[in-house]
Amino acid sequence: GSRPRDRLPRARSRKPTKKPTKFAMSRASGYDRHITIFSPEGRLHQVEYAHQAVKKNQNVTSVALRGNDCVVGVTQKKVPDKLMDKDFETHLYNITPNIGALMTGMTPDARALVFRAREIAAKFKDQNGYEIPVHFLALKLANIGQVYTQHAYMRPYGVSTMLYSIDDEQGPSLYQVDPAGMYLGYKAAAAGTKDQEAINALEKVVKKKLDLTETETIQQAIGCLQAVLGMDFKPSDIEVGLVCKSRPGFVRLSEEEIDQHLTAIAEKD
């Protein structure tokens, strides 16, 4: 019994080889398969992809600006589903009554990290009898972030965290913690899809050395995000959270208050 014709092993057709992109090369070489392995250029590809998750996950950009006696965070509010209750879509969280967090990136990861932060803050207050300073909380969260870049069975949190509070010693404080466990104090910070454009815009604001009162800080921050995204906001498009010496704790602005500020910004121009 001779084998039927179609059973013969076929010759493989050779595809013309394209020159691989740098991104594809890192993939092909397998250095992005594992979080704990350095590439020959000394990079951790998975950790870099975690930064991309912050940018690409929700297509949201956030900015924060530190004023004379306040810190203001502004982010986009996108309700993904017409049937959803819009009050549940938020990027602003309280860690303690006085420390606010603005989370940009993957919402489930953000929530998980917020819960860790609250636990750390509550434990600190219990053990020391006073509230955790915001710089120390930023350090603690950064330490958690760093661990996830070093263990193969975990993945980094796909969120950029901005923490702000009026510190008893330092005054208005703004800290940003990235997925790799890098944490720094900022005069102004940005995260998300258009973070680089937002950083450039914020640099211009900081350079002007304006008298950043509460109202001015809020309007500069909103105006900055508006300019970067090239759109005119409706009050329901954004969330504004701030800490300020004039009012206790971390406060979220109502749509009416946001509307007043948007009107003032429009009149300034």
Image (cartoon, rainbow, N blue to C red):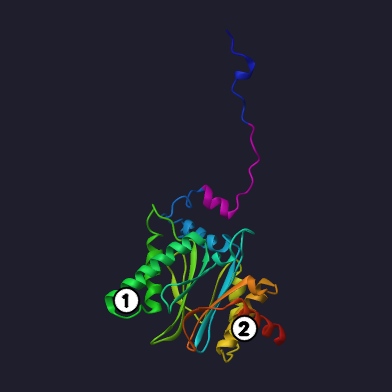
Q: Nearer the viewer, mark 2 or mark 1?
A: 1
Amino acid beneath label 1: Lys
Residue 48 shown in magenta: no
Q: Secondary structure at mark 2?
A: helix
Residue 19 location (% of width, % of height): 62, 49
| Residue sitting at x 62%, y 14% | 4
Crowding around mark 1 (Cα neighbors within 10 Å: few <14, some 14 to 19, many 20+) is few
**Magenta segment boundaries in residue numbering:** 13-28
Q: Is residue 174 above or below residue 3?
A: below
Where residue 140 appears, as percent x and y from the top left, is 37, 70
Farthest-out residue, bottom: 211
Per the image, label 1 sits on a secondary structure element best described as helix
The x and y percentages for residue 169 are: 38, 87
**In which quadrant is the N terminus drawn?**
top right
Query: On the picture, is 129 further left or further right than 226?
Result: left
| Nearer to us in this view, 119 or 222 | 119
